[in-house]
Image (spheres, rainbow, N blue to C red):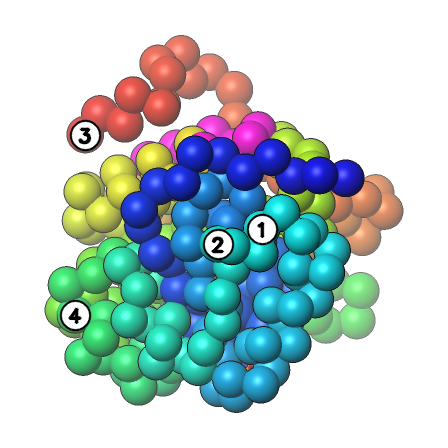
């Protein structure tokens, strides 16, 4: 299927740990809506492999999808941390100078699987996002993308029917990410408050994964009752 590229927007988005299912699918999805996306990795070679895999699948995104090490991804205008939860803060810290002043998205969920059950863990400071914020105090941390399944993110020809809960202490940073999310077909960005709410957003992922197992599917959240068009992105 040919993925129509949207009109290019001049924002480069780097993904730290972008070689995993979530990061590579997010990078490809962002490229498909007109953003320049850089897949980052601890190994530039792994990043190249991940990038080539996505381009092979979706040739139309080639001009907007590149790769590099995590430092190259951290040099972008907006940065997403897509490593496992227990390495998100250290990965951010390793790139602290590059991340200062930037909008940085934490999408990691601290979870453990015990038998058939997913259980949320409580990381230092109550959430992965808060832990990352403490590790890189000069960065503008936003929590988002926790509930978007990598598989659906990577199906570039199809919309993702989901709300995306976004929280952060820097409202301008939340608006920046809301604007990006609003361009993903099917996604509705919702301002879910301060960064302290990342605790609930991250933990809720355990519930969604449990539902996936129970109903043999991949769920995504959609909330009712919000009348105002959240795409207006008012503070
Ligand atoms: N999978 C999903 O559907 C999904 C959906 C929403 C949110 N998330 C969240 O998004 C994050 C990424 O998910 P994923 O499934 O893509 O994870 P993953 O495959 O386990 O890891 C992603 C990448 O992180 C890097 N990494 C692994 N261990 C590391 C370490 N110790 N230090 C630094 N980097 C390390 C690796 O890249 P390199 O080896 O190339 O550096 C790896 O490819 C997770 O925190 C997850 O909770 C996942």
Of marks 3 and 4, the one in the foreground: 4
Residue located at (39% from left, 64% from top): 14
The reply, left or right, for residue 122 in relation to residue 45 is left
Question: Residue 88 appears at what percent x and percent y?
Answer: 41, 75
Residue 32: quarter of image: top right
Whether label 3 lies within 8 Å of ligand 1 gets the answer: no
User: CA gap, disc 2 to disc 4?
Assistant: 25 Å
- Of pointers 4 and 1, the one earlier in the residue sequence: 1
> Which segment did they paint magenta?
183-191
Q: Which is nearer the eye, 219 or 182?
A: 182
User: CA gap, disc 1 to disc 3?
Assistant: 33 Å
Residue 105: quarter of image: bottom left
Q: Is 41 within the magenta?
A: no
Residue located at (34% from left, 80% from top): 71
Residue located at (18% from left, 79% from top): 97
- Of pointers 1 and 3, the one earlier in the residue sequence: 1
Question: Label 3, on which residue?
Answer: 235
Quadrant position of the N terminus in the picture? top right
Of marks 3 and 2, the one in the foreground: 2
- Check disc 1 and report its element: helix, strand or loop: helix
User: CA gap, disc 3 to disc 4?
Assistant: 23 Å
Q: Which mark is residue 64?
A: 2
């Amino acid at each position: 299927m040919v993925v129509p590229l949207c009109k290019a927007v001049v924002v480069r988005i780097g993904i730290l740990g972008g070689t995993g299912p979530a990061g590579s699918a997010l990078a490809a999805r962002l490229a498909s809506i007109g953003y320049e996306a850089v897949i980052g990795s601890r190994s530039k070679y792994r990043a190249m492999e991940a990038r080539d895999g996505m381009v092979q699948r979706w040739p139309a995104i080639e001009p907007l999808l590149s790769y590099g090490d995590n430092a190259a991804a951290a040099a972008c205008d907006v940065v997403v941390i897509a490593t496992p939860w227990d390495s998100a803060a250290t990965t951010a810290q390793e790139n602290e100078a590059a991340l200062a002043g930037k909008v940085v998205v934490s999408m990691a969920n601290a979870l453990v699987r015990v038998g058939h059950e997913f259980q949320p863990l409580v990381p230092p400071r109550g959430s992965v996002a808060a832990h990352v914020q403490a590790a890189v105090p000069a960065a503008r941390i936003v929590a988002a993308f926790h509930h978007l399944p990598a598989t659906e993110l990577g199906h570039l020809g199809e919309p993702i029917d989901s709300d995306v809960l976004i929280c952060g202490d820097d409202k301008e940073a939340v608006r920046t990410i809301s604007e990006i999310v609003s361009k993903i077909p099917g996604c509705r960005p919702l301002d879910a408050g301060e960064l302290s709410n990342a605790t609930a957003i991250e933990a809720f992922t355990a519930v969604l994964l449990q539902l996936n197992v129970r109903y043999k599917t991949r769920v995504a959240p959609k909330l009712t009752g919000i009348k105002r068009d959240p795409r207006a992105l008012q503070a």
